[in-house]
Amino acid sequence: MTQQELIKIATITIGIGIVLGTFIVLLIQVQRQKLVINSLVSLEQLIGLSGIVEIPFDQNSKGKIRVNAKGSLVDIVALSNVSHHFKVGEEVLIIEAHENKVRVIPMSYLTDELLNNS
């Protein structure tokens, strides 16, 4: 092959690469425009989720729980009306949310209730 033929082939190859690369970038941009990303978690979205006690508490004090919501770990102040001492690592269920606090019950209450009713 002559040098002119090699330059011609290289130019065509580079041109095809640029066109295909541009096409792929455009496809990615179109796909991203269709995605709705909202990583903010509202208190109402926490109701019904389970969490893990991080700072122990009881009916007369506040504590802290950690919840996995929308793929993010959220730490939040927790309260309870239940006469129970919540220990670190205990699983709880969020039943109410108000003013940046959540009200919880022990997950064990639910399993005990299910066992008693069967």
Image (cartoon, rainbow, N blue to C red):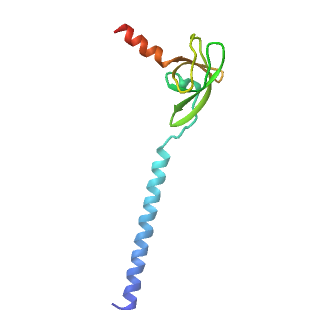
Is there any visible trace of residue 66 in the rendered image? yes
Point out residue 11 in the picture as x, y percentages from the top left corner.
42, 79
Q: Is residue 95 left or right of residue 17?
A: right
Residue at 37% across, 8% down: 117
Point out residue 29 in the picture as x, y percentages from the top left corner.
49, 53
Residue at 39% across, 77% down: 12
Quadrant for the C terminus, please. top left
| Above or below: residue 91 compared with residue 8 | above
Quadrant housing residue 39: top right
Quadrant housing residue 114: top left
Quadrant for the N terminus, please. bottom left
Residue at 66% across, 16% down: 61
Quadrant housing residue 38: top right
| Above or below: residue 31 compared with residue 42 | below
Is there any visible trace of residue 45 in the rendered image? no
Point out residue 45 in the picture as x, y percentages from the top left corner.
53, 26
Q: Is residue 52 left or right of residue 21?
A: right
Residue at 46% across, 17% down: 108
Q: Residue furthest top?
A: 117
- Count of all numbered marks drawn on residues in the image: 0
Please name whichever residue, 11 or 105, is drawn nearer the observer in this view of the structure. 105
Please name whichever residue, 64 or 19, is drawn nearer the observer in this view of the structure. 64
| Above or below: residue 77 compared with residue 12 | above
Please name whichever residue, 82 or 88, is drawn nearer the observer in this view of the structure. 88
Point out residue 66 in the picture as x, y percentages from the top left corner.
57, 30
Please name whichever residue, 32 or 52, is drawn nearer the observer in this view of the structure. 52
